[in-house]
């Protein structure tokens, strides 16, 4: 395994561990999701270079588009939840309450 693969795998693993264990604030969960998407984007962008195939740039661009949509939706949810609940703490959100 090359150092490049190790760095991608470790970045994705650390982001997923951060999402699993540090879920006190909504903004920290969103940052972990964004770092997971960023590591996947960099891995997809470097994949044609490593395999020495003709450049397929559609998949990284599509991933970047979905990542931007996810970030916008997450920030909109953050603003809406902060306005209604007063903070972005995840333990304040009761999903069973209407």
Image (tube, rainbow, N blue to C red):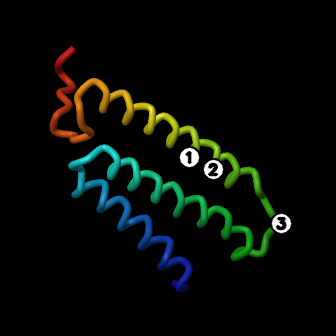
Residue at which label 2 appears: 64
Q: In the displayed structure, would residue 74 be above or below residue 11?
A: above
Answer few, some or many: residues within 10 Å of disc 1's Cα (few below 14, many 20 plus, some between 14 and 19): some
Q: Which residue is mark 3?
A: 54
* Farthest-out residue, bottom: 2
Q: Which mark is residue 46?
A: none
Quarter of the view holding residue 83: top left
Mark 2 → mark 1, Cα distance in angstroms: 5 Å
**Residue 82 screen position, x and y as percent:** 30, 32
Callout 2: SS = helix
In the image, what residue occupies the spot 16% across and 34% down? 92
Select label 3 or label 1 by which is in front: 1
In the picture of the structure, the residue carrying the numbered disc 1 is: 67
Disc 2 and disc 1 in contact, CB within 8 angstroms:
yes
- The image shows residue 35, relative to residue 83, as above or below, that is below
Residue 20 is left or right of residue 33, and the answer is left
Judged left or right of residue 85, residue 46 is right
Q: Position of residue 28 (x, y in %)?
A: 32, 52
């Amino acid at each position: 395994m090359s150092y490049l693969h190790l760095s991608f795998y470790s970045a994705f693993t650390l982001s997923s561990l951060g999402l699993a264990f540090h879920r006190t604030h909504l903004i920290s969960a969103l940052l972990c999701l964004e770092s997971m998407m960023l590591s996947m984007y960099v891995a997809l962008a470097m994949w044609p270079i490593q395999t020495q195939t003709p450049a397929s740039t559609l998949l990284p661009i599509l991933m970047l588009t979905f990542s931007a949509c996810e970030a916008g939706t997450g920030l909109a949810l953050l603003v809406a939840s902060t306005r209604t609940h007063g903070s972005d703490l995840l333990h304040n959100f009761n999903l069973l309450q209407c």
